[in-house]
Amino acid sequence: MTAVAATGTIRVVVAKPGLDGHDRGAKVVARALRDAGMEVIYTGLHQTPEQIVETALQEDADCVGLSVLSGAHLTLFPRVVELLRARGADDIVVFGGGIIPVEDIPQLEAAGVARIFTPGARTGDIISWLHETVGSAAGA
């Protein structure tokens, strides 16, 4: 049973993988999700994919939101998905955002990233998408 199915509240891990040192966008999204009634766990800067996955498992997260501005998204995002699958947690939805070229999105989706939000995405759109995607996946 997912956390949202048990509690009715979506639990989101927001993470900054890699050496990217800019987290303003991640913090804006984290706060918007929290203000929308979601439980948000923000991991802070410089997290490895392994640390992010461990946090998601320990926190019984329904989804993981990744933010990358460094250009390492094609490596880091698929690695998080791969590690979740290896731990039997492929029900945890992975989504991301940051400075990600539109031409890279199909490759990320093929790797199992459910959605990419590019610069300028509205927090309301992210919230709506999470309710539709995570809520419906959990039967909420």
Image (tube, rainbow, N blue to C red):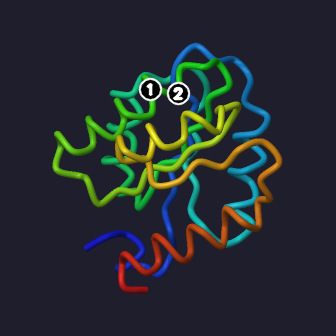
**Mark 2 crowd level (few <14, some 14–19, many ≥20, 10 Å Cα):** many
Q: Please name the residue that numbered disc 1 is placed on.
A: 76
The Cα–Cα distance between marks 1 and 2, rounded to whole angstroms, is: 5 Å
Q: Nearer the viewer, residue 26 or 71?
A: 71
Instruction: Identify the residue shown where x is 60% and y is 69%.
Output: 129
Tell me if mark 1 has few (under 14), some (14-19) or many (20+) residues whose alpha carbon lies within 10 angstroms of its own.
Answer: some
The tally of labels here is 2
The answer to whether 8 appears left or right of 78 in the picture is right
Which x, y percent locates residue 38? 60, 67
- In the visual, does 49 lie left or right of 82? right
Q: Is residue 1 above or below residue 73?
A: below
Horizontal and vertical percent for residue 102?
A: 64, 39
Residue 61 percent across, percent down from the top left:
40, 56
Question: Label for residue 11?
Answer: none
Query: In the figure, is residue 30 to the left or right of 41?
Result: right
Q: Which residue type does callout 2 highlight?
A: His
Q: What residue is shown at x 67% (from left), y 62% (from top)?
A: 126
Asked where in the image residue 87 lies, by quadrant, the reply is: top left
Indicate the secondary structure of the residue bearing disc 1: helix
Q: Quadrant of the N terminus?
A: bottom left
The residue at the point 43 percent across, 22 percent down is 75
Q: Residue furthest top?
A: 19
Left or right, residue 54 beside residue 20:
left
128, above or below 69, in the image: below
Q: Residue at x 22, y 45 (%)?
A: 85
Nearest the camera: 106 or 94? 106
- Note whether 75 is above or below 124 in the view shown: above
- Which residue is at the front of the view, 24 or 132? 132
Query: CB atoms at circles 1 and 2 under 8 Å apart?
Result: yes
Query: Residue 73's mark?
Result: 2
Q: Amino acid at mark 1?
A: Leu
